[in-house]
Amino acid sequence: MHPRLRSVAAIAAPPRNASRTLGALALTAGLLVAFQVVAPAPASAALPGAVGRSAQSPFDSERAKTIEATCPPGKRVTGGSGRVTGITSHVVLTRMQPRHTNNPDVPDSYVVTAIEDETAPAGQWAVTAYALCADPLPGQTIVISRSPTDSGSSEREIADCPAGRRALGSGVRVNGGGGQVHVTEMTMGAFANGRTSSFVTAQENHDGFGGDWSLDAFAVCATIAPERQVYLSSFAPGPGSADRKVADVTCPAGMTITGGGAEIGASSGRLVMERILPEFLVGGIPGDEYTAVAREEILNDDFWSLRVVASCVD
């Protein structure tokens, strides 16, 4: 079937030779995104009580693995991400999800799942979850939106923050797919009217998937002054058809990451997100940088891109 995209404004990409230009702005179909990268600078947590946690699964040959990075007691999750390490070929990320319950005895967390596809890797691998946490913020909540369940080859879903609240972090979950559907986008952005959202996309691999599946988008939202936050984005440099790409983005001096994500462009089911990695400073304090890595799972001679996104707060 043809890919079906939900009604959504596309995030514009800056010119390739301007991906590291300070202050470039893109405004497309009402969606405003700042493309800004600054030179790395010493970072310290600006958000009150900001702390990072990670957890890694065992290295083995289990087909599906889920791992949870847990926030310290009293902290709330603002965002997070995940990575696959070891023999990563034919292992795909299908879930990167912020979690909060109304039970005060259950701490916030960030949950990551990776699954082997129908080919399966030739060795052992592990999955790591990263949680970005901080003191509770006014109006903090997690918004969830689910796509229809069908057999479309691609799905895109949006989780909109309530009016007056801003997206600090993003999350995604593929429901079904049997390892043949993987995440190709988990990003955030701000509309020109001030509303902020999380955008997620998943796609069937080059072999396709014969059953139905759906896609969940998550947005961690809170009341925070717009002038205290900026969304930054940067593209991976290098050849358009490279077999592996790395993209990184750095917040302005004095700002801290609260969440991040990445997007593979023109994937055609042959490209896989391998890791979306937040910077942690000494002592487990969130830094000011996010890095994303994507690779070709199947030989792909076409142009493709990798974009990394970060939410930065002072």
Image (spheres, rainbow, N blue to C red):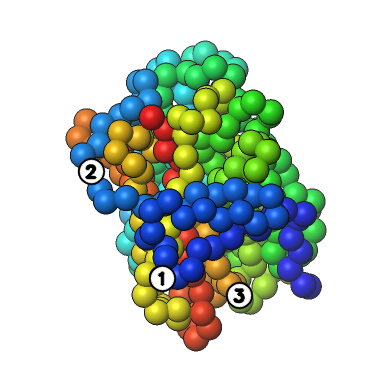
Q: Secondary structure at mark 1?
A: helix
Q: Badges 3 and 1: C-beta atoms under 8 Å apart?
A: no
In this rendered view, identify the residue nearer to me: 214 or 158: 158
Quadrant in which residue 126 is drawn: bottom left
Residue depicted at 38% across the width and 29% down the height = 314
Q: Could you say which disc has been placed on residue 211 in the image?
A: none
Instruction: Decide which of tag 1 and tag 2 comes sooner along the chain.
Output: 1
Q: Residue at x 25, y 48 (%)?
A: 40
For marks 2 and 3, give the CA distance: 37 Å
| Residue 192 falls left or right of residue 72 | right
Q: Is residue 53 left or right of residue 92?
A: left
At a point 51% along the width and 34% down the height, the residue shown is 168
Tag of residue 41: 2
Q: Residues within 10 Å of mark 1 (few under 14, many from 20)?
A: few
Mark 3 or mark 1, which is nearer to you?
A: 1
- Near mark 3 (Cα within 10 A), the count class, few <14, some 14-19 or many ≥20, is some
Determine whether 133 is above or below 288 in the image.
above
Q: Which residue is mark 1?
A: 17
Please say if 294 is above or below 75: below
Q: CA distance from mark 1 to mark 2?
A: 23 Å
Residue 147, percent from left and from top: 75, 49
Q: Quadrant of residue 193?
A: top right
Q: Amino acid at mark 3?
A: Ser
**In this view of the protein, which residue sits in the foreground, 108 or 248?**
248
Image location (x, y in percent) of residue 132: 40, 34
Numbered disc 2: secondary structure:
loop
